[in-house]
C-alpha cells in the first residue's frame, strides 16, 4: 500500500537492526501479562511485543532485552513502575466516538425508556475498559441528548470509566482529541458538546466541561479478585476487551462486572464478544446486548 511506512523488505531490515526479543524472553513476558492482565499472548504476538517494547528500551537507554527483563522483574518500586509502563505499551487501545453505534441506539430507544419506566431518575453507567475516553464521553452525550429530548423522564446520570492503563486514563481525563476523531458526528453534536482549538495546523477538539464533569475515571484491573467501585450500575459497557482473554477469564470478569449491575440492568459487549456457553444470569436482548435477570 502506498501509505505503508515500510515495504515488507524494509520492515525486515528495520527489525534486523533492532534488539531482538528471544523466544524465552517473549515467553517470560507473555506468561506475566497473561496472569496479571489476562491478555492471551500467543506466539504470533512476539514481533508486536518486541516492536512495542523498543520504546521502553529506548527510554531506559538499554541496548538489549536481557537488561530489560532483569529490570522489569527485579521487584521493588522501580520494577512496579516499569511493569505499569510495559502494560501501557502492550495493551491495545483502539477506540472511537460512537463505536458500534447500534448499542447507543438501543440504549436511547429501549434501555433508557425502560429504566425510566422502572422509576430510575438517575442512571449510573460504567464504561469498563474505557481506553482514551471516547466511549465514556459518547455515553455522556447519549445521556445528555436523552434528557434534553425526553424531559421529565431521567433527570441525572453518572459515568464511571475504568482502565488498567494509566497512559490512556491520562488521555481520557485530558479529553483532547484530533478534530478528525469527531468527523462522523453531526454538526449539531459537535457544536453542543465540543470546543474547537484555534490552531489551524493541528486542529483539536476538547470535550465540554458539562460532559466531562459527569465522568469519573479510576484505574481498575479486571484480573483483581473483586472490583472496588462505588454504587450499583444500571448500564455497563465492557467492549472489545474480553476478546483478549481466554474463555474462563471472560466468564469470571463478566460475573464480577454484573455483580455491580441491578436486576433489569443492561450489559453491552463488543461486536465479536459472546457469552455463549457461559452460565450467567443474563438474557440476550439484541446482538451483544444483555439484560440481567
Ligand atoms: C480496545 S480498547 C476498548 C475501548 C472501548 N471499550 C471500545 O470498545 O472502543 C481495550 C481496553 O481494555 C484495557 N484493558 C486490557 N486489559 C485490561 C485489564 N486486565 N483490566 C482493565 N482494562 C484492561 C486496555 O488498556 C484498553 O484500553
Image: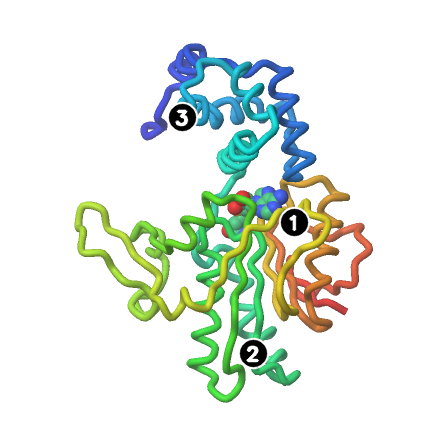
Q: Which color scheme is applied? A: rainbow
Whether residues under marks 2 and 1 lie with C-beta atoms below 8 angstroms apart, the answer is no
> Earlier along the polypeptide chain: callout 3 or callout 2?
3
Distance, label 2 to label 1, CA atoms, is 28 Å
Mark 3 is surrounded, within 10 Å at the Cα level, by few (under 14), some (14 to 19) or many (20 or more) other residues, namely few
Name of the residue lying farthest toward the front: 76
Against 224, residue 106 (above or below) is: below
Say what secondary structure mark 1 lies in: loop
Residue pictured at 38% horizontal, 15% vertical: 10
Residue pictured at 71% horizontal, 47% vertical: 250
Say what secondary structure mark 3 lies in: helix
Name of the residue lying farthest toward the bottom: 152
Residue 160: % across, % down? 54, 62
Query: Looking at the figure, which quarter contains the C terminus?
Result: bottom right
Against 110, residue 180 (above or below) is: above
Q: Is residue 218 left or right of residue 244?
A: left
Q: Foreground residue, 32 or 282?
A: 32
To which residue does mark 1 refer?
Answer: 273
Q: Foreground residue, 221 or 276?
A: 221
Against 152, residue 39 (above or below) is: above
Residue 167: % across, % down? 45, 43
> Earlier along the polypeptide chain: callout 2 or callout 1?
2
> Earlier along the polypeptide chain: callout 1 or callout 3?
3
Distance, label 3 to label 2, CA atoms, is 46 Å
To which residue does mark 3 refer?
Answer: 59
Against 172, residue 141 (above or below) is: below
To which residue does mark 2 refer?
Answer: 122
Amino acid at each position: 500500500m502506498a501509505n505503508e511506512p515500510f515495504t515488507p523488505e524494509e520492515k525486515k531490515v528495520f527489525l534486523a537492526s533492532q534488539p531482538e526479543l528471544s523466544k524465552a524472553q517473549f515467553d517470560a513476558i507473555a506468561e506475566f501479562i497473561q496472569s496479571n492482565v489476562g491478555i492471551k499472548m500467543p506466539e504470533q504476538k512476539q514481533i508486536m511485543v518486541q516492536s512495542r517494547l523498543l520504546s521502553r528500551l529506548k527510554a531506559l537507554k538499554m541496548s538489549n532485552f536481557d537488561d530489560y527483563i532483569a529490570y522489569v522483574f527485579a521487584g521493588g518500586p522501580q520494577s512496579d513502575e516499569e511493569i505499569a509502563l510495559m502494560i501501557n505499551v502492550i495493551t491495545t487501545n483502539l477506540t472511537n466516538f460512537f463505536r458500534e453505534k447500534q448499542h447507543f441506539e438501543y440504549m436511547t430507544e429501549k434501555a433508557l425508556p425502560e429504566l425510566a419506566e422502572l422509576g430510575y431518575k438517575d442512571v449510573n453507567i460504567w464504561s469498563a475498559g474505557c481506553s482514551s475516553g471516547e466511549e465514556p464521553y459518547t455515553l455522556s452525550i447519549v445521556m445528555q441528548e436523552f434528557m434534553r429530548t425526553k424531559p421529565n423522564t431521567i433527570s441525572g446520570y453518572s459515568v464511571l470509566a475504568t482502565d488498567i492503563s494509566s497512559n490512556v486514563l491520562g488521555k481520557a481525563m485530558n479529553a483532547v482529541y484530533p478534530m478528525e476523531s469527531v468527523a462522523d458526528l453531526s454538526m449539531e453534536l459537535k457544536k453542543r458538546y465540543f470546543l474547537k482549538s484555534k490552531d489551524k495546523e493541528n486542529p483539536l477538539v476538547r470535550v465540554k466541561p458539562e460532559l466531562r464533569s459527569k465522568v469519573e475515571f479510576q484505574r481498575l484491573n479486571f484480573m483483581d479478585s473483586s472490583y472496588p467501585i462505588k454504587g450499583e450500575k444500571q448500564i455497563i459497557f465492557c467492549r472489545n476487551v474480553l476478546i483478549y482473554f481466554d474463555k474462563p477469564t471472560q466468564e469470571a470478569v463478566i460475573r464480577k462486572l454484573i455483580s455491580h449491575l441491578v436486576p433489569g440492568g443492561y450489559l453491552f459487549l463488543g461486536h465479536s464478544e459472546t457469552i455463549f456457553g457461559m452460565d450467567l444470569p443474563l438474557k440476550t436482548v439484541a446482538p451483544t446486548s444483555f439484560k440481567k435477570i
